[in-house]
Amino acid sequence: MLQGQLEIQLIAIVTAVACALPGVFLVLRRMTLMSDAISHAILPGIVLAFFLTESLSSPLLILAAAGTGVLTVVFVELLQRTKLVKEDAAIGLTFPALFSIGVILISRFAGNVHLDMDAVLLGELAYAPLNRLETFGNDLGPVSLYVMGTILLLNLAFILLFYKELKLATFDASLAATLGFAPTLIHYGLMTLVSVTTVGAFDAVGSILVVALIAGPPATAYLMTDRLSRMLLLSAVVGGVNAVSGYWLAFAFDVSIAGSIATVTLLMFGLTFMAVPNRGLIAIARRRACQKWEFAQTMLVIHLFNHEGLPEAEAESEIAHLHEHLRWDPAFATQVVKYALNNRFVLQKETQLTLTQQGRTIAQQALVQ
Amino acid sequence: MQALETKAIEVTDLTVAYQDKPVLWDIDLDVPPGVLLSIVGPNGAGKTTLIKAILGLVRPAAGNVLIYDKPYEAQRRIVGYVPQRGTVDWDFPTNVLDVVMMGRYGALGWIRRPRKQERALAMNALEKVGMEGYATRQISQLSGGQQQRVFLARALVQDSTVYLMDEPFQGVDATTERAIVDLLQELRENGKTVVVVHHDLQTVTDYFDWVMLLNIRRIASGPVEETFTPENLRQTYGGRIAFIKNE
């Protein structure tokens, strides 16, 4: 593996994990769309900071963008608080307004500078290693690895330090308020982190992928566990796995790395959605199918039980007559009989069915309920 | 000269409004220590808002609230709150014991994490509400009555002096209701003050010793036998009250 490849993957993993951690709380607060809004609305902040510093790599860009991100949250909440606009509409009104201010600024004043929309919106992981951090002629590695590494540490520190407060404020904000934990402060702390993360990540991977990285792994992890701490851990792992497998997929098909990682994120979610034990689609379908057979089997044993020992028993327990008496489709009847035979609830003598002791017990239990 | 008698909760001239629509008009309420008080009134009477205003969760347009002679901010540690069950997301990834331990967060303060001691206190509270067997259960798997008991346990673990509960009987079965009532009465016997937003007029006299009748303004408050009169109820509910028997 070339050094460049290794660096790209490292950047991808660090970015994915940095996004996944605050993403967990956004998903639980039903605020993932806010990250989408922030990732677009920070554009005017970036542009203004660029005009001031005339450099794309100045840390001021990140600060200005993060400030604009928090401003987005404030605007959305102010609009919402009027009760004249709902949250989704407030988001939909705020971020295009801010984004378009950025677009107008670029097109009016920065036409001939290197600050084009593609770079801002899509980013390009493949070029990330080209921008290197150097001191006294020594190459220390790609800048974005340092930027994202710092943001990751920041996120990790915040969540480890305020885990209890974040959990309480997310689960029950009013209890948090009555206990004196200032849920608004925690909220804005989290949103500042999301803004900083979005800005940092979007320089490396573009704004669309940022949203995928923030929403995808936590939503996947949410399906896998019932504990918040594990959800955080799993989100980080899923984010990292998505990043690496997305990279190699992009390498194999020679396509955009960001697009490929976003696609893998979706696939991973879909796979989990289908296959996760207990609550996945497959498990649910299997449980439903089981219930259907279980219920039919119960009907069968009750039917046999009710007529057991009576003169008509012989006619009633004729397999061929099940579809007549119970109005069952012959194929279905055969299946049910097979199911009950397997469970040893009935015995078959030629075309006659008789109950086993076990079957009798089941029928009695079902009738008592 | 004897000092004025201390009140557990003292609400004076409290007005709460959303925009210019008053939800509570000039409420005065004195709750002496050690009573079990129910707040009753029709829908939209402002019962929940009153509780929230006492807890500082909504900002009043005017008026004052004191808990044992001090503002709420100074008395957080001695006030326990049971919000309505429907105000939280029960699909949140956490288990019963964890939710109950949240009641200790206030005593722990910022950053410090719950430890063995908090765990033991939470288990103890779960035993009191008969839910010790559910400690590791994911909260989405609980029935409505069980969720309510978990919320009660979370308030018990705060070991408060004053408890404010918003509709703790909502959507629970008869057994759970009985268990909750026993618990509330036990709290009162231990000298705690308990304020409960309540819906069922039929049970007021059985369950509570004090009552406040509220419909945006305070109609009456005091011991049940003096306050819970047909005349006061008529004033609170207007003509829409047919099922109160004249004894």
Image: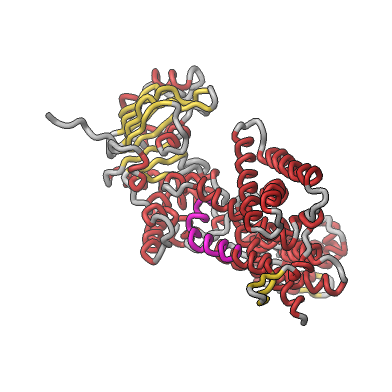
Can you give x and y, in whole percent of width and height, for residue A251 in the image?
83, 73
- Quick one: quadrant of the C terminus of chain A? bottom right
Q: How is the rendered protein coloured? A: secondary structure
Q: Position of residue A110 (x, y in %)?
A: 78, 48
Q: Which residues are magenta?
A: A151-171
Instruction: Please tell me whether residue B69 belongs to the stretch shown in magenta.
Output: no
Q: Nearer the viewer, residue A13 or B169?
A: A13
- Image vertical order of residue A240 relative to residue B184, above or below: below
Q: Give the quadrant of the N terminus of chain A.
A: bottom right
In front here: B215 or A288? B215
Q: Answer with left or right where residue A296 lies relative to residue B146.
A: right
For this rendering, which residue is in front, A284 or A78? A78
Evaluate whether residue B103 shows in this view.
yes
Name the image quarter holding residue A102.
Answer: top right
Q: Position of residue A107 (x, y in %)?
A: 81, 45
Q: Residue furthest front?
A: A136
Q: Is residue A159 magenta?
A: yes
Which residue is painted at 62% across and 67% down in the image? A149
**Residue B61, placed above or below residue A293:** above
Q: Return the residue found at the far bottom.
A: A1
**A331 relative position to A278: left or right:** right
- Mainly helix, strand or loop, the magenta region? helix
Q: Is residue A267 visible?
A: no
Viewer-nearest residue: B23 or B244: B23
Residue at left offset 42%, top offset 47% = A180
In the rendered image, residue A188, in percent from the top left (x then y), is placed at: 55, 48
